[in-house]
Amino acid sequence: MKPILSVKGLKKSYGAIQAVNDVSFDVMPGEIFGVIGPNGSGKTTMFNSMLGQIQADAGQIFLNGEEITNLKPQQLSMRGVGRTFQTLQVFGNMTVRDNLIVAAQEHHGTMLNRLFAATDSGLGPQADALIEMFNIAHVSRKPAGALSYGQQKLVDIAMAFMSEPSLVLLDEPCAGVNPLLVVGISRMLKELNQQRKSSFIVIEHNMDFVMSLCQRVMVMVEGEVMMIGTPAEVRANKRVLDAYLGS
Ligand SMILES: Nc1ncnc2c1ncn2[C@@H]1O[C@H](COP(=O)(O)OP(=O)(O)OP(=O)(O)O)[C@@H](O)[C@H]1O
Ligand SMILES: [Mg+2]
């Protein structure tokens, strides 16, 4: 089986800080691939430099064998790559349902399209399916800003799936979310992974979440890959624990 994504020798520095230092890994079709590492270890910078948000200093990215290095977020979205950000991206004054529809319009067209397109553009059924799956039907007509932080997080995650992506990168989907909802998010991601055969790369600090959801986990420390292994292999590695304890 060929990887859906290959990252080769990715580097990004900020002055003297090597935020991402020669990172290479593959993600297989249908895989849920976890990324863990202490604060400031370069996880978000890696996502941003893989996805055209910032320009990498070196390295290549391949999607299904085709080079996608330095493509813009919109171009990546058209090729089936979605993402969520570490901070919420929902529009607070727009309803939950409209947030989902707008997220997909971004994928389909331009900013103008997004501002002036008919309210639905045929995307309603897709939005409603995700609203159902994410258990947010009861709040779907409310302005997203009126929802709890955890519910907004669900909307934010659902938005990434509106363009029916084959690969989704999630940056801390469980940050600030209560333990019950963490279990719910895990279940929803598993369901999406199975139903849509999509692959995920998930950055998370919540170890129970990562270890129960992911087939393989990459550990980043100071911009470098410390190890890639199964959850059991990562748990058993003393260097990983030391990295977290700061020794
Ligand atoms: N725009 C920037 N300018 C300068 N330094 C930056 C910038 N963005 C990130 N850094 C630095 O790069 C390093 C990696 O940061 P990054 O945000 O990628 O870490 P992270 O692993 O996502 O951390 P966290 O778990 O806290 O989200 C840190 O030392 C950070 O201070
Ligand atoms: Mg981060």
Image (cartoon, helix red, strand yellow):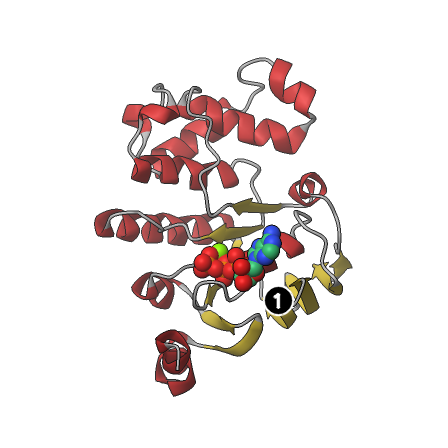
Of residues 225 and 161, the one nearer the viewer is 225
Q: Which residue is mark 1?
A: 17
Q: Residue 130's x, y, as percent?
A: 42, 35
Does 74 appear above or below 125?
A: below
Does 223 appear above or below 116?
A: below
What residue sits 69% from the left and 66% below the top? Answer: 11
Q: Of the residues shown, which amino acid type is indicated by label 1?
A: Ile
Instruction: Give the side of residue 8 with respect to residue 227, left or right.
Output: right
Q: Quadrant location of residue 122? A: top right
What residue sits 33% from the left and 66% below the top? Answer: 207
Q: Residue 76's x, y, as percent?
A: 68, 45
**Mark 1 Cβ inside 8 Å of ligand 1:** yes
Q: Quadrant location of residue 118? A: top right
Instruction: Give the side of residue 72 with respect to residue 82, left or right.
Output: right
Q: Residue furthest front?
A: 16
Disc 1 crowd rating (10 Å Cα; few below 14, some 14-19, many 20+) is: few
Instruction: Give the side of residue 139 with respect to residue 56, left or right.
Output: left
Q: Quadrant location of residue 149? A: top left
Residue 195 appears in the picture as rendered: yes
Quadrant in which the C terminus is drawn: bottom left
What residue sits 31% from the left and 40% below the top? Answer: 150
Residue 43 appears in the picture as rendered: no
Quadrant in which the N terminus is drawn: bottom right
Q: Residue 214's x, y, as percent?
A: 42, 65
